[in-house]
Amino acid sequence: MMDCHICGTNAPLWAQAKILKKYDVSYYRCPHCGFIQTEKPYWLGEAYSEIIDAEDIGLLRRNIDNAAVVSRLVPAFFPRAETFLDVGGGYGVFVRLMRDRGFDFQWDDKYTRNLFARGFEKNRERYDIVTAFELFEHYDAPKEEIKNLAVLGDTIIFSTLLLPEPAPKPDEWWYYSTSTGQHISFYTKRALEYCAQSIGRYYTGSTGIHIFSKRPISSWQFRLAVSRIGWILSRAQRESLLPKDYERLTGEKI
């Protein structure tokens, strides 16, 4: 048994799998909120020998898709937002894409080299909106990490895949990512609602994209905004920051 990282309920052993093709690891599922967690992840040092795993061939496509979705969500629900921070920003691809779209994003990542958002690193304590893509499934202490995000901003837009129903075993769902060993926390809608309540936020979400916000958001409007016809809610285009960024970095105008 382990205490659930989300709601504290005793979570019994639920499954076992081989991590990194050599470690036999136990998974525990909470009977109350449905959250699934691994045993204490002693293998993470080895799993993160390369921060961006070689198997993550969808990195660029994911950043392009995330930029499109956030560009619809912000004008639809947070039109007055002006300051943005991408936590766990990796190489800075998402930040650069968002700045090109006119959103004043900054970058923050303790572990990865900033390649595409240099000059736009985190430089303030609070932001209107914080984004956190593909981080939640990596958290060993999710409630503490989510509280840290809440300190940075009132609104958190993030991604993680919800557990399907019925919950699949580790050999039945690719998102467990047993070959890389980096995914150790898996959420249900109820688990994310608990997380939102713990930081005084409302939860709205879909299968992959989610929001913790200070005010409730209509679920149908959210689903429309994240869909490919969401441009209906976000016709107003922001002016790209690319020319200003180039002048700021080089002293020259485009």
Image (cartoon, grey):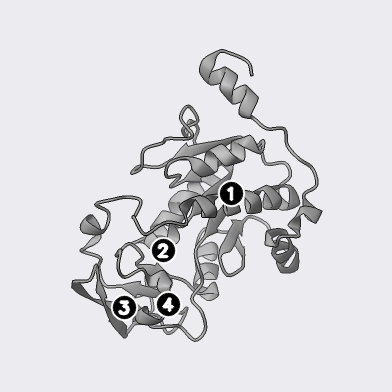
Q: Depth check: 139 or 164 in front?
A: 164
The reply to whether dot 2 and dot 1 touch (C-beta < 8 Å) is no
Disc on the earlier residue, 2 or 3: 3
Q: What is the CA distance from the residue labelled 3 to the residue labelled 1?
A: 32 Å
Q: Does the image show residue 83?
A: no
The residue under the point 48% across, 38% down is: 107
Q: Is mark 2 on a helix, strand or loop?
A: helix
- The picture places residue 134, in percent across and down from the top left corner, at 46, 57
Disc on the earlier residue, 2 or 4: 2
- The disc at residue 137 is 2
Q: Which of marks 3 and 1 is in front?
A: 3
Amino acid type indicated by mark 1: Asp
| In this picture, residue 187 sits left or right of residue 252 | left
- The picture places residue 186, in percent across and down from the top left corner, at 42, 71
Amino acid type indicated by mark 3: Tyr
Mark 4, residue position:
173
Q: Residues within 10 Å of mark 1 (few under 14, many from 20)?
A: some
Disc on the earlier residue, 3 or 1: 3
Q: What is the CA distance from the residue labelled 2 to the residue labelled 1?
A: 21 Å
Disc on the earlier residue, 1 or 4: 1
Amino acid type indicated by mark 2: Glu
Q: Nearer the viewer, mark 2 or mark 1?
A: 2
- The picture places residue 219, in percent across and down from the top left corner, at 71, 68
Mark 1, residue position:
154
Q: Is mark 1 on a helix, strand or loop?
A: strand
Q: Does the image show residue 42?
A: yes
Toward the left, the furthest residue is 22
Disc on the earlier residue, 2 or 1: 2
Mark 3, residue position:
27
Q: What is the CA distance from the residue labelled 2 to the residue labelled 3?
A: 14 Å
Looking at the picture, does residue 230 appear above or below residue 86? below
Disc on the earlier residue, 4 or 3: 3
